[in-house]
Image (cartoon, rainbow, N blue to C red):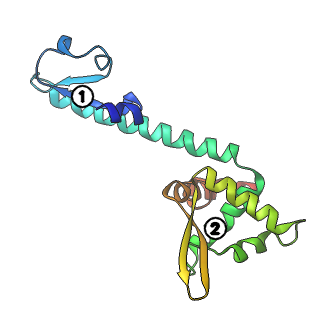
Amino acid sequence: LGVALGLKPSAQILLLLDGNPSQLSFDIRGNHVIRYDATDHVAHLAEAFIAAARAFERDYRMCIADLRHRLSSDAIWLMHHLATQVASEHGAAMSGDQAAQIFVAAENPRLRYALAEAELLRNRVVEMDHQPIPNGDAFATRPTPLGLRLIDETWTSPAAAEASAGTE
């Protein structure tokens, strides 16, 4: 319970209780507590699950919106390029050489790529994939689950498609 309280918002934690709520420790008494020996516990539990799911969805959307507002234009550009890789037959990874090509017309393309990639790594929307190969190592950038959600919400969801159609 301590780990759950430390990692999740309390709106997403449900405590089922057999007994008197006044006997709970003071530090968990303020959470959503449902007595499973109450006559209407099923209705309360259903309402609590729905409220927890809504809280999760709200927090998730706020996280994606925060990422969109916080990332630099180069990081978004790189993420958009990775989104096209995810959607293509080539798979969901790209090498540094492939990714740096999107900055080829810019000044200092390798530096801009490296800074954008570092920003995406810091924000946990991409991760590095390392594979040892004969005579060296191969590295590729892959989206994390959060990165896949950012891609979906920004470029592939119906709402994203409607938004981009309105700007054309």
Q: Quadrant of residue 32?
A: top left
Residue 15, which numbered label? 1
> Residue at (41%, 36%) from the top-left corner?
7
Q: Residue furthest bottom?
A: 134
Relative height, residue 93 to residue 66 (above, below): below
The amino acid type of the residue labelled 1 equals Leu
Identify the residue position indicated by label 2 in the image.
82
Can residue 139 be seen from the camera position used here?
yes
> Residue at (54%, 80%) from the top-left corner?
132
Quarter of the image where the N terminus is located = top left
Query: Is 150 placed left or right of 76 in the picture?
Result: left
Mark 1 surroundings within 10 Å by alpha-carbon count, few (fewer than 14), some (14 through 19), many (20 or more): some
Give how far across and how far down residue 133 sits, in percent.
55, 85
Which residue is more in the foreground, 136 or 45?
136
- Secondary element under disc 1, as helix, strand or loop, is strand
- Secondary element under disc 2, as helix, strand or loop, is helix
